[in-house]
Amino acid sequence: MPKKFGAVVVAAGSSSRMGGGVSKVLLPLGGKPVLQHSLETLSKSRWVEKLAVVCREEDKNQIAGLTAGLSKPCVLVNGGKQRQDSVLNGVLALDDCEYLLIHDGARPLITEELIHRICKDALEYQACSPAVRAKDTYKLTDPRGFVTQTPERDRLMAVQTPQAFLRSLYLTAVQQANEKGISFTDDCQLIEAAGGRVHLLEGDYRNLKITTPEDLLAAQAYWKGAGQMRVGNGYDVHRLAQGRKLILAGVEVPFSLGLLGHSDADILTHAVADALLGAAALGDIGKLFPDTDPQYTGADSLELLKQVCEKLREAGFSIENIDATLIAQRPKIAPYIPQMRENLAGACSLEVGRVSVKATTEEGLGFTGEGLGMAAHAVCLIS
């Protein structure tokens, strides 16, 4: 069972660049306030145990209404003078959580898939943040507006939220900053200033922050496109042969025969990969990893699946769920299905609950029924 995270959602800003007045996190997006999108997505994650929303006193009643239907406990706390003070108020309200997620309430397009990857990264590195590579060239200037330096674009990363930290690490860093009278607007910078190391993982360009009216228009455009779902179907078949290991979804299943193929002949993983590629109209695994290429001889199909998922993310797709079925007369597969689900979920950076693996026979009919080979079907939903 994974360690639980407390999520601090920062929603106490003045919204001055939006023109002031109503808080930007309460502006409408897709039929509900901006803030409600983040709260609902965070509360759905199996990693998140409870939430704390840091907000302005005048917004509390309205925000309390947004939290009423959440599936996880949520407390409202007052903002401080600076962002660092506001975040600390939220952190102190989550005193029994070992890890923290700190998220800007003005980033409504966060996905469960990204939250999942962030939490796993935090368990390994103790401090992490999603980030995307800079698309433009940036300049450093002097006070008069003249260029002083052009940083290498390949090394520039734009950090996003939620950022995740071991709670004790965060509290030590904020104590040091407060003792020195320093206030940071980025939580990673707080850790860095205390001598800590922050790991960056791949973010999502759609995970934008609403700061100006133009950002809200962009978020509305993304939101309209978020409802576009695609279904993919994958199928693979291999002959059984002597002298081969039987690899299914990365699990070596004890059996006298194995599947014959150029790679490890993992038909379950191949079917999943083809379903994902098909849903995104990105070709198939034969095109991406041809059996004429010697580098794929004996290749680990789970590693190939990771590359497929990377291509989907680069194309702007998120995986919603996967359902795979193995067709084989023998051996019995049921004892190995939990590990198969774990392996496929890990390769796709998904929660296990989004991955299904089943096995069936064909009652002695056909080539699978006669024990000549095995087949696998997979379907997936992406958005």
Image (cartoon, rainbow, N blue to C red):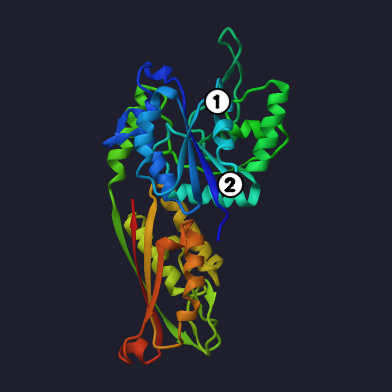
| Relative to 326, residue 355 above or below | above
Residue marked by disc 2: 97
- Is 57 located above or below residue 42 in the figure? above
Above or below residue 146? Residue 89 is below
- Residue assigned mark 1: 83
Q: How far apart are marks 2 and 1 (CA)?
A: 21 Å
Residue 77 position in % (x across, y down): 49, 31
Callout 2 amino acid: Cys
In the image: residue 336, left or right of residue 151: left
Question: SS at mark 2?
Answer: loop
Crowding near pointer 2: few (<14 within 10 Å), some, many (20+)? many
Q: Can residue 169 be seen in this view?
A: yes
Disc 1, SS: helix
Image quadrant containing the N terminus: bottom right
Q: Position of residue 58 (x, y in %)?
A: 40, 22
Kindly indicate the quadrant of the structure image that contains residue 187: top right
For the residue pair 193 and 2, the one nearer the viewer reads as 2
Query: Tag 1: Cα neighbours inside 10 Å, few (<14), some, or many (≥20)?
Result: many
Tell me the amino acid under the disc marked 1. Answer: Arg
Mark 2 or 1 closer to N-term?
A: 1
Residue 307 percent location from the top left of the image: 49, 57
- Which residue is at a point 35% across and 22% down the rendered structure image? 213
Residue 287 shows up from this direction: no
Q: Where is residue 115 in the image (x, y as percent from the top left)?
A: 48, 47
Is 335 in front, or is 372?
Answer: 335
The answer to whether mark 2 and mark 1 are in CB contact below 8 A is: no
Q: Looking at the picture, tell me which residue is in the foreground, 273 or 8.
A: 8
